Image: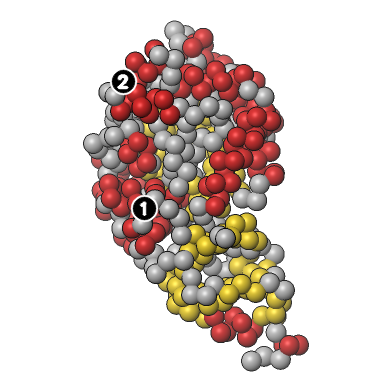
């Protein structure tokens, strides 16, 4: 053992980790079969300083090398990177469980909308709500996600669909980022749907987005990404190209909801515009998937949404992996089609319904999801220089994460080296 004067200082050290899943990959996502390689270190320790990992080594070496005011004995727990939930819609007022019951009775989307449900009902209540209410409701939801192991999440607007309400949602997201102990990445989704007042004037709403909403969002600096819902029943390819091109010209990074229901060429457009990610992709064509690979676009798959909608088909994750794409997964937490806040359950569905393995699903939920937010150089894996975003699990191994359904075995969550949740 080194003498005290020879030992280095660390803010936190964690020792006695039975298996440390690093997912380190030389500053790039894991492509295709690389997703199966978890890079596990046994009997490991971690040293943390200034919010970042400064060293990973065997437990005894870390304990001998560093002095610290906070020693965490993992007592044989498993350590993984914190979950990166790269697609969520957490800022809304009312939940829509009645629609869930209606779907189970065989009601269609159109029938539910005519009965006063659907996305337009969420839009109306969001427009009417004050910021404090939206903040408190979203805060409660995000704290629950944090307890389930999420240390970074993306949060979209998209339930206002007019300039004041979209900006209001983005201000709420900014406040959540400032006041909560996890990273929240803001995304402008004004092109989520056509609001009722523009139902018969699509070109007018596209003009509003391009001439008023996007410039206002960019001027206020309250969104990092611009997203759009590109489908046959919402924004078509040309409308999507116009809106996303405008967003890019205003300095916003690009994302797309696309080819969820029909293969209308959304994946191809995401490749053309070099979006950071293309999300959903439940019906994407093989041509579209190959275009994503060539353009370096991250495919983000949302199995919990398809599960909630009782879909008989899922995105072709195995084809994407066989073609060498870096697949990511996310919850798609929202009030309508998917009220799922658990990345662990999302991993389970990715394994059971999309053919991922536990190792590839964990990679999709951490490292590759970080790249889907353009943050792969900061988070998503456990290695020196990255943020100390760590989950300690009271489980025998990583296969247990998607294997177990219905409750969480998260023991402790650290964000930038600070414990933000500990099981009691």
Residue closest to the far front: 424
Query: For the residue carrying disc 2, how many other residues have a C-alpha within 10 Å: few (<14), some (14-19), or many (20+)?
Result: few
- Residue depicted at 76% across the width and 88% down the height: 5
Question: Looking at the rendering, which quadrant does residue 156 occupy?
Answer: top right
First in residue order: circle 1 vs circle 2 = 2
- Residue depicted at 28% across the width and 47% down the height: 354
Give the tally of numbered discs: 2
In the displayed structure image, the side of residue 175 where residue 392 appears, left or right: left
Number of the label disc, if any, that sits on residue 108 = 2
**Image position of 385 with respect to 99: above or below:** below
Residue closest to the far right: 5
Q: Position of residue 265 (x, y in %)?
A: 33, 30
| Spatial CA span between label 1 and label 2 | 29 Å
Q: Nearer the viewer, residue 412 or 218?
A: 412
- Residue depicted at 48% across the width and 64% down the height: 393
Q: Secondary structure at mark 2?
A: loop
Q: Position of residue 377 (x, y in %)?
A: 55, 57
Residue at image mark 1? 405
Colour logic = secondary structure
Q: Is residue 18 visible?
A: yes
């Amino acid at each position: 053992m080194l003498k005290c004067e020879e030992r280095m200082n660390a803010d936190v050290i964690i020792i006695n980790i039975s298996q440390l899943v690093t997912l380190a990959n030389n500053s790039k996502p894991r492509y295709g079969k690389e997703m199966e390689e978890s890079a596990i270190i046994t009997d490991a320790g971690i040293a943390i300083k200034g919010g970042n990992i400064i060293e990973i080594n065997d437990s005894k070496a870390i304990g001998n090398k560093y002095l610290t005011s906070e020693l965490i004995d993992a007592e044989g727990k498993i350590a993984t990177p914190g979950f990166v939930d790269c697609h969520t819609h957490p800022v809304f007022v009312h939940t829509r469980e009645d629609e869930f019951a209606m779907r189970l009775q065989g009601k269609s989307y159109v029938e539910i909308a005519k009965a006063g449900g659907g996305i337009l009902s969420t839009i109306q209540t969001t427009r009417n709500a004050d910021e404090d209410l939206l903040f408190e409701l979203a805060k409660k939801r995000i704290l629950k996600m944090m307890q389930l192991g999420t240390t970074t999440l993306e949060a979209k607007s998209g339930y206002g669909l007019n300039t004041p309400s979209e900006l209001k949602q983005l201000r709420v997201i900014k406040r959540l980022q400032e006041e909560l102990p996890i990273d929240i990445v803001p995304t402008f989704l004004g092109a989520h749907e056509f609001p009722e007042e523009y139902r018969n004037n699509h070109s007018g709403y596209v003009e509003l987005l391009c001439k008023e909403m996007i410039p206002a969002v960019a001027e206020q600096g309250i969104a990092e990404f611009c997203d759009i819902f590109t489908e046959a029943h919402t924004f078509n390819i040309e409308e999507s190209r116009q809106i996303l091109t405008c967003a890019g010209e205003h300095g916003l990074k690009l994302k797309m909801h696309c080819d969820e229901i029909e293969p209308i060429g959304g994946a191809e457009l995401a490749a053309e515009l070099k979006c950071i990610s293309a999300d959903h992709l439940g019906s994407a064509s093989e041509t579209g998937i190959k275009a994503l690979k060539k353009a370096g676009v991250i495919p983000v798959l949302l199995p919990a949404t398809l599960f909630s909608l009782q879909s008989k088909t899922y995105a072709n994750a195995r084809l994407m992996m066989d073609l060498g794409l870096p697949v990511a997964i996310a919850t798609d937490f929202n009030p309508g089609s998917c009220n799922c806040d658990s990345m662990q359950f999302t991993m389970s569905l990715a394994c059971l319904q999309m053919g991922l393995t536990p190792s590839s699903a964990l990679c999709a939920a951490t490292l590759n999801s970080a790249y889907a937010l353009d943050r792969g150089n900061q988070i998503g894996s456990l290695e020196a220089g990255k943020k100390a975003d760590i989950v300690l699990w009271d489980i025998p191994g990583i296969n247990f994460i998607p294997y177990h359904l219905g409750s969480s075995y998260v023991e402790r969550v650290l964000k930038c080296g600070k414990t933000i949740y500990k099981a009691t």
